Amino acid sequence: MKVRSLFACSILLSAIGGTANATTYTLPENSNDSVITQFQDDVPLTRAEQNETLPDVARRFLLGQTEIVRLNPNLDRWQVKKDEIVHLANRRILPDTPHEGITLNIAEYRMYYYPPAQKGVAPRVMSFAHGIGRQDWKTPLGKTTIVRKVKDPAWHPPESIRREHAANGDPLPTVVPPGPHNPLGAYMLHLAVPGGYLIHGTDIDKIYGIGMQITHGCVRMYPEDIEALYNSVPVGTPVYMVKQPIKVGWLDNTLYIEAHPDLEGEETTLEQRLDTALKLIQKANIARDGVYAANRSGTDAARSLPELDRTALNQALRALDGNPVAIYQRLPQQVLPVMLPTRQGSKGGYFHGV
């Protein structure tokens, strides 16, 4: 396998409506496919050019810290030696939500933004790492919208947070002005959620906490990512906040599964994860077979589970590394023309298309 240096010039980066760059994927040509790919040559690797840490690599490639640690279980998080190979993320399965606005999947510390379609441009999705709320400050779930945007915000710490910091010997002022040590960063998006939940940037002191469960409920992003998002989304943009630790999706007649570990304070068994996975696989199979329903007899075949690679499925549900794994491949099915009875004046007596 060819190993190359995948620094910023090698990542697919794109600026959409703003001045900053963010990781952008082209959506699959088949609208029923939901697996996106960053490196088309399937070589998601980089070689450390100096002694560094996994959070350093995550920062360079706009990945979350939890994500890169899971992808590299045999590397020391705090001591990556020069010339060591680091695995990066490549494929992702889109969350099961409408492909509009923003989706926050807190189970994978990842956000997806679907820019409006542009004439002559293939549909795209932008994906960002982000931090989420701790066990005692959970990020809420449900559908909401962006109701306000603020550049260079001042932070007014809630009384509950001020009490917590005071108890830890780190008292906070009533107002933290804009600047490099402001926890809100340089951009802030208000959500229509009671309690004042936000999507915002970060200060230089907490920048390596992106992709971890460490916030007071809000969603925290890298500076360049929140800048790109801020400059792309208008007020009123829908936001879907979901928790989908297991995702299933198709790409070119191959079915993939992606599994993430439980969040802090939660615990599921392998049997529970398997039950969830099989239900998602059945749902994906039914949706896929719906394309060919007109050419198949009965409905039982459309509702049955495919012949899965059970070894790969169980391995993915045990590893929980967030890396999509192929568990089934089907042969492409041909949609046959529907023969119609010949009528007077008809030309050929058949019809093309679906």
Image: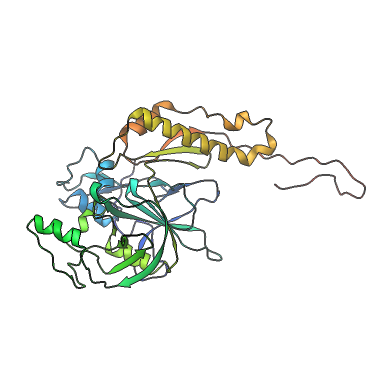
The colour scheme used to paint the residues is rainbow
> Which sits in the foreground, 27 or 242?
242
172 with respect to 226 (left or right):
left
At which x and y percent is residue 331? 57, 34
At which x and y percent is residue 344? 93, 47
Residue extending farthest left: 169
Which residue is rendered at x = 35% and y = 30% of the image?
315
> Which sits in the foreground, 81 or 20?
20
Which residue is rendered at x = 37% and y = 46% of the image?
243
Which of the 4 image quadrants contains residue 321? top left
2 with respect to 175 (left or right):
right
Which of the 4 image quadrants contains residue 196? bottom left
Q: Quadrant of the N terminus?
A: top left
Q: How many marks?
A: 0
Which residue is rendered at x = 47% and y = 58% of the image?
124
> Which sits in the foreground, 38 or 182?
182
Which residue is rendered at x = 32% and y = 30% of the image?
269
At which x and y percent is residue 266? 28, 39
248 with respect to 204 (left or right):
right
302 with respect to 218 (left or right):
right
At which x and y percent is residue 218? 29, 57
